Amino acid sequence: MTSTAAVAIEIPEGRVNFFVRGRVAMLGLIAAESTIFTIFVVAYLFYLGKSLTGPTPKDVLEPPILFSICLLSSSLTIHAAIKQLRRGNSKAFVIWWLATIALGGAFLYGTAREWYRLIYVHGLTISTNVFGTTYYSLVGLHGFHVIVGLILLSTVMIFALFGAIKPAHCERLDVLSLYWHFVDVIWIIVFTVVYVIGR
């Protein structure tokens, strides 16, 4: 005759539960956003070289290598920030978190500068030709996601400056960092499609 025994595992109230739910929700969002990006990437590749008028990608695009390095480096700084917070070093957390925001901001500045050059020097707008339409749609979609990420990161920074971010919040920040890593990975794909394959 066998007997079954229930084993109870104590979980701190709200901690692991939020982490699991938050991570699942963020992964669901990332999956949905990945689908949208896939559609835009496929459209860009499908219409590549089909513009009847100039300018063409080869004529006007210059790979934003420096600003790409800034964005990709921000994945390292956000990881370092959360690692420092786990150790209870709030000051180092603020420095690394601020570095993440600065690197993301530098990338957005680079995008704005490139768009200014394309519009006012080369006359490429979203309505100039098919290339202009697909380029601004794809790169603009990514830029929008960077802006959303920077708003979220800046909100955390405001709370941190008032001393409201504690090591207990690391799980929540881990979930937020997933979004930022996603933005960085998407840029690798967009950069490859637009500035390598597309030229």
Image (cartoon, grey):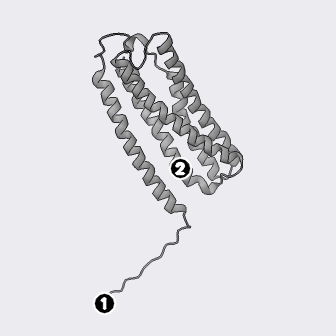
Q: Quadrant of the C terminus?
A: top left
Looking at the picture, how far across and down is residue 79, in whole percent?
A: 56, 43
Q: Residues within 10 Å of mark 2 (few under 14, many from 20)?
A: some
The residue type indicated by label 1 comes to Met
Q: In the image as oriented, which residue stretches furthest toward the bottom? A: 1
Residue 82 lies left or right of residue 37; in this view the side is right
Looking at the picture, how far across and down is residue 185, in whole percent?
A: 44, 36
The residue type indicated by label 2 comes to Asp
Whole-Å distance between the Cαs marked 1 and 2? 47 Å
Looking at the picture, how far across and down is residue 66, in whole percent?
A: 54, 23
Decide: is 41 above or below 127.
below
Looking at the picture, how far across and down is residue 181, in whole percent?
A: 48, 40
Q: Which residue is located at x 27 percent, y 24 percent? A: 46
Give the residue number, with chain letter if any, for mark 1. Answer: 1
Question: In the rendered structure, which disc, 1 or 2, sits on the residue that comes first in sequence?
Answer: 1
Between 27 and 143, the residue placed more toward the observer is: 143
Between 6 and 141, the residue placed more toward the observer is: 141
Q: Which residue is located at x 35 percent, y 18 percent? A: 131
Q: Residues within 10 Å of mark 1 (few under 14, many from 20)?
A: few
Element under disc 2? helix
Give the residue number, with chain letter if any, for mark 2. Answer: 174
Q: Which residue is located at x 37 percent, y 83 percent? A: 4
Q: In the image as oriented, which residue stretches furthest toward the front? A: 127
Element under disc 1? loop
Residue 73 lies left or right of residue 51; in this view the side is right
Marks 1, 2: nearer the viewer: 2
Decide: is 98 above or below 29.
above
> Which numbered disc covers residue 104?
none
